[in-house]
Image (tube, rainbow, N blue to C red):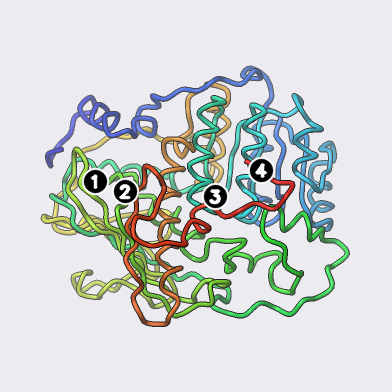
């Protein structure tokens, strides 16, 4: 696309041609809910942490008929909020028991159980709102998209910044080519805010309120230890996806939407060191993207850990924000401070006129994101961050970075460059990474 003013018709046509017409024009459709003119029946898998707000936001658009959590204390607290909802500890039992009484599920568990719960429900025709990152592995992300498309269900990943007008406007500006040829994208976060690069905690007695076997779900068995539940699981390879998986679905979201950052061909990392059980405290990861039919080849660099940021000279004398994204083109730059694309500024270029489709405006961006999901269930129009066309490719791109981290376990030593074939989901030059691309499931959990 050429820089400058873009007509609405031209922009919508170009965006649809690039495969993102749904977020601009709402062009993709799925099977509408049988309850399109009735109240949506929701169930929630995971009701604490982000699951608390996901359940609350969902309940504003329908009835909560089922709640599930492996933590009895959290389940009891949620039951007080939703007294009419049936309580479950095992999501498999809930999905089977509720049957046609539920239309849609929110999935807000640790990363390693997202796919097992969501795929089972989608195969029974249920719509899914799943927290970010959509999955624990690249293979799961591909499967989630395939299953969603096959069953014609409405899906949405919980990267709520997608529903901000500022993010959509900035992405639309990038698609006009206003910055000229883009060569670099830099993304940085102050996460992790939990300890990583550490040894396992000592085995301890499982608290009486926690079902540890169900908490482990499809992950390999290990003894319970203080520190896994309810939050620090993010730092362990078997359960979470590290700082990259935690924040990149937010902070990479704007340039991903604006530049089609899909299917990188290689990725390389340097880390602060790790034991391949716990993620490193710090990593810097470089992704290479080939040219597509409307932009040239470019690189993206990811930085995690407080103080790990792009070179200061890239900010033209400005103080870098704690977290954010910076897109560098031949004519200018776009800087978005923070994690969600809540604001942006153009450096060196004038702001072109663009249009975009807003999400429903019912409250904050988290509430708007769920409102879009509920609205789409009734209309049959796909949600913006739907699994097959948006959230799946975004998740695949992001999680590829952890393959590079895996082969960079020595502190300060850049690991071997991982050559990636996205179509076949295979590493072309390094053996032994299959278990990271597709971790095995424990018996009792399948895709």
How far across and down, in percent of the image, does residue 278 sit? 57, 72
426 left or right of 71 in image: left
- Cα distance in 3D space between marks 2 and 1: 12 Å
Q: Are marks 1 and 3 in contact (CB under 8 Å)?
A: no
Counting residues from the start of the chain, the first of labels 1 and 3 encountered is: 3
SS at badge 1:
helix
User: Considering the image in quadrants, where does the N terminus appear?
Assistant: top left
Residue identifier under label 2: 261
23 left or right of 7 in image: right
**Dot label at residue 135:** 3
Counting residues from the start of the chain, the first of labels 4 and 1 encountered is: 1
Q: Residues within 10 Å of mark 2 (few under 14, many from 20)?
A: many
Q: Nearer the viewer, residue 28 or 149?
A: 149
- Cα distance in 3D space between marks 1 and 3: 27 Å
How far across and down, in percent of the image, does residue 259 sit? 27, 46
Q: Residues within 10 Å of mark 3 (few under 14, many from 20)?
A: many
Give the mark toward the camera: 1 or 3. Answer: 3
At x 84%, y 38%, the residue is: 86
- Cα distance in 3D space between marks 4 and 3: 14 Å
Give the mark toward the camera: 4 or 3. Answer: 4
SS at badge 3:
loop
Residue identifier under label 4: 446
Give the mark toward the camera: 4 or 1. Answer: 4
- Cα distance in 3D space between marks 2 and 3: 18 Å
In the rendered view, tell whether residue 288 sits above or below residue 92: below
Give the mark toward the camera: 2 or 1. Answer: 2
SS at badge 2:
loop
Q: Nearer the viewer, residue 222 or 188?
A: 222
- Cα distance in 3D space between marks 4 and 1: 40 Å
């Amino acid at each position: 696309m050429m820089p400058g003013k873009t007509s609405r018709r031209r922009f919508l046509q170009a965006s649809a041609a690039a495969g993102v017409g749904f977020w601009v024009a709402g062009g993709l459709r799925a099977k509408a809910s049988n309850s399109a003119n009735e109240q949506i029946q929701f169930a929630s898998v995971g009701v604490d942490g982000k699951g608390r707000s996901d359940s609350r936001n969902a309940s504003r658009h329908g009835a909560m008929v089922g709640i599930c959590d492996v933590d009895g204390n959290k389940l009891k607290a949620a039951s007080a909020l939703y007294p009419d909802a049936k309580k479950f500890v095992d999501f498999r039992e809930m999905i089977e028991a509720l049957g046609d009484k539920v239309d849609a599920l929110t999935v807000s568990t640790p990363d390693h159980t997202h796919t097992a719960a969501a795929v089972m429900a989608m195969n029974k025709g249920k719509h899914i709102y799943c927290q970010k990152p959509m999955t624990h592995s690249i293979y799961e992300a591909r499967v989630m998209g395939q299953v969603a498309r096959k069953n014609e269900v409405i899906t949405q990943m919980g990267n709520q910044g997608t529903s901000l007008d500022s993010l959509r406007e900035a992405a639309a500006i990038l698609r006009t080519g206003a910055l000229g040829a883009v060569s670099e994208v830099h993304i940085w976060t102050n996460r992790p805010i939990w300890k990583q690069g550490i040894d396992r905690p000592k085995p301890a007695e499982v608290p009486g309120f926690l079902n540890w076997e169900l908490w482990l779900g499809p992950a390999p068995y290990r003894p319970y230890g203080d520190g896994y539940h309810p939050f620090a699981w993010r730092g362990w390879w078997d359960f979470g996806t590290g700082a990259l998986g935690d924040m990149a679905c937010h902070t990479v979201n704007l340039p991903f939407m604006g530049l089609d950052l899909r299917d990188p061909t290689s990725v390389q990392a340097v880390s602060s060191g790790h034991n391949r059980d716990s993620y490193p405290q710090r990593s810097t990861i470089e992704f290479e993207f080939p040219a597509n039919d409307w932009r040239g080849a470019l690189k993206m660099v990811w930085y995690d850990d407080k103080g790990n940021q792009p070179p200061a000279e890239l900010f033209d004398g400005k103080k870098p924000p704690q977290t954010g994204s910076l897109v560098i083109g031949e004519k200018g730059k776009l800087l978005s401070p923070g994690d969600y694309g809540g604001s942006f500024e153009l450096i060196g270029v004038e702001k072109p006129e663009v249009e975009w489709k807003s999400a429903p405006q019912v409250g904050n961006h988290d509430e708007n994101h769920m409102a879009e999901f509920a609205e789409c269930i009734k209309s049959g129009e796909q949600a913006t961050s739907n699994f097959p066309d948006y959230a799946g490719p975004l998740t695949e791109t992001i999680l590829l970075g952890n393959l590079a981290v895996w082969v960079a376990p020595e502190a300060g030593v850049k690991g071997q460059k991982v050559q990636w074939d996205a179509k076949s989901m295979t590493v072309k030059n390094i053996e032994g990474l299959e278990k990271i691309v597709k971790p095995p499931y424990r018996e009792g959990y399948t895709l």
